[in-house]
Amino acid sequence: MPARTVGRVQTRAAFRQLQRSQSRASCGPVRASFVAADDQLGGVYPQFGYAIGKHCGNAVVRNTIRRRARETARGLASELPRGTFLLRFEPAAAWATSADLSRCISQALLRSSQATHLVNA
């Protein structure tokens, strides 16, 4: 079995911390927030949470968006810093092509992780 490259955000505290984060970025219908992991913690890989409201569509549409987002996140995991990410989606994500949605997710994730350096400076 391959080693895990991404994790899931599972606690309310982590979601609250992501909602208060100043490290944010957006691209098209995707908004990303980022909280860096503590440097003392070893072996922490990027963790992701997905916020896809009912305004995006029915359960089938929301699950499709989530699957596309997970696949893109797995592909980017090696390029992203250790920490926690939250991806939020606007209704336009339901009509975006896979390539466009993947591009927007990639840009939002990379920009949000780079915004940390600007906020902490």
Image (cartoon, rainbow, N blue to C red):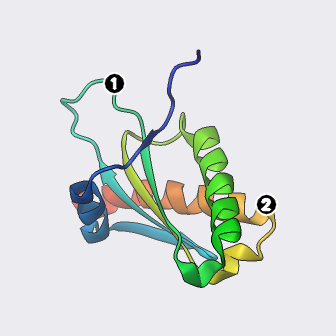
Task: Quarter of the image for the C terminus: give it.
Answer: bottom left
User: Residue 95, relative to residue 10: is it above or below?
Assistant: below
In space, the residues marked 1 and 2 are separated at their CA atoms by: 31 Å
Left or right of residue 50: residue 16: left
User: Percent position (x, y) of residue 4?
Assistant: 50, 26
Task: State yes or no: discs 1 and 2 in contact (Cβ < 8 Å).
Answer: no
The amino acid beneath tag 1 is Gly
Left or right of residue 115: residue 79: right
Q: Residue at x 69, y 55 (%)?
A: 68
Q: Which residue is mark 2?
A: 98
The amino acid beneath tag 2 is Ser
Element marked by disc 1: loop
Residue 43 badge: 1
Task: Quarter of the image for the N terminus: give it.
Answer: top right
User: Percent position (x, y) of residue 27?
Assistant: 59, 72
Question: Circle 2: is it few (<14), some (14-19), or many (20+) Cα within 10 Å?
Answer: some
Q: Residue at x 79, y 59 (%)?
A: 99
Closer to the camera in the image, 6 or 117: 6
Question: Circle 1: is it few (<14), some (14-19), or many (20+) Cα within 10 Å?
Answer: few
User: Percent position (x, y) of residue 23?
Assistant: 34, 64
User: Residue 84, relative to residue 1: is it above or below?
Assistant: below
